[in-house]
Amino acid sequence: SDPKTAKYYENEGKNFVNNEEKELDSLAHNKTADVLAALFAIFGFFGIIFTAWQLLEKPDGLCTSCCRLTVKAAGCLLKIVFLPCRLCCSPYKGYSGTNDPRDPNNNSVFDGPEMA
């Protein structure tokens, strides 16, 4: 390979890394990000307090219903996300019925010779 080409790409790589370091340093010292983080923290804290107050004062209100809906939706989403893990790792795989068709706990498909 050409030594000039290798040197060129080496300098380009160093320039790219230096530019990225400068950009990350400028982002770390950005006051706007600090102010926004503080505002989000303050509004979040007061939002939590307001939500708890509404849940205690109006247990059948709109805020409580929205909280219940959010918890149910999050639970459903987590069940969907972890479904493959539950299918692979669950000790309750398949049906746990017996083969006797007269047994009320039979969960198998009736494919025996005694299908009367």
Image (cartoon, helix red, strand yellow):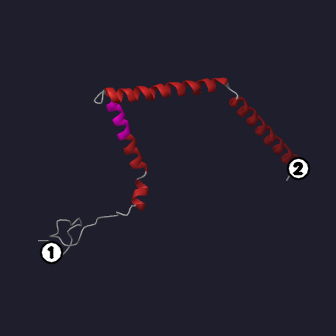
- Report the label total: 2
Q: Nearer the viewer, residue 76 or 112?
A: 76
Q: Residue at x 71, y 34 (%)?
A: 24
Image position of 7 (left or right of 60): right
Magenta stretch mostly in which secondary structure? helix
Residue 114, label in figure: 1
Query: The residue under label 1 is which amino acid type?
Result: Glu
User: For the magenta stretch, what is the residue range?
Assistant: 64-72
Quadrant of the drawing holding the C terminus: bottom left
Q: Secondary structure at mark 1?
A: loop
Question: Residue 113, image x and y in percent?
Answer: 17, 76
Query: The residue under label 2 is which amino acid type?
Result: Pro
Q: Nearer the viewer, residue 36 or 24?
A: 36
Question: Residue 74, image x and y in percent?
Answer: 40, 41
Give the residue number, with chain letter if any, for mark 2: 3
Q: Nearer the viewer, residue 113 or 40?
A: 40
Q: CA distance from mark 2 to mark 1?
A: 84 Å
Q: Residue at x 47, y 25 (%)?
A: 46
Query: Marks 2 and 1: CB-CB under 8 Å?
Result: no
Image position of 23 (left or right of 46): right
Q: Is residue 52 magenta?
A: no
Residue count near mark 1 (Cα–Cα under 10 Å), binned few <14, some 14–19, many ≥20: few
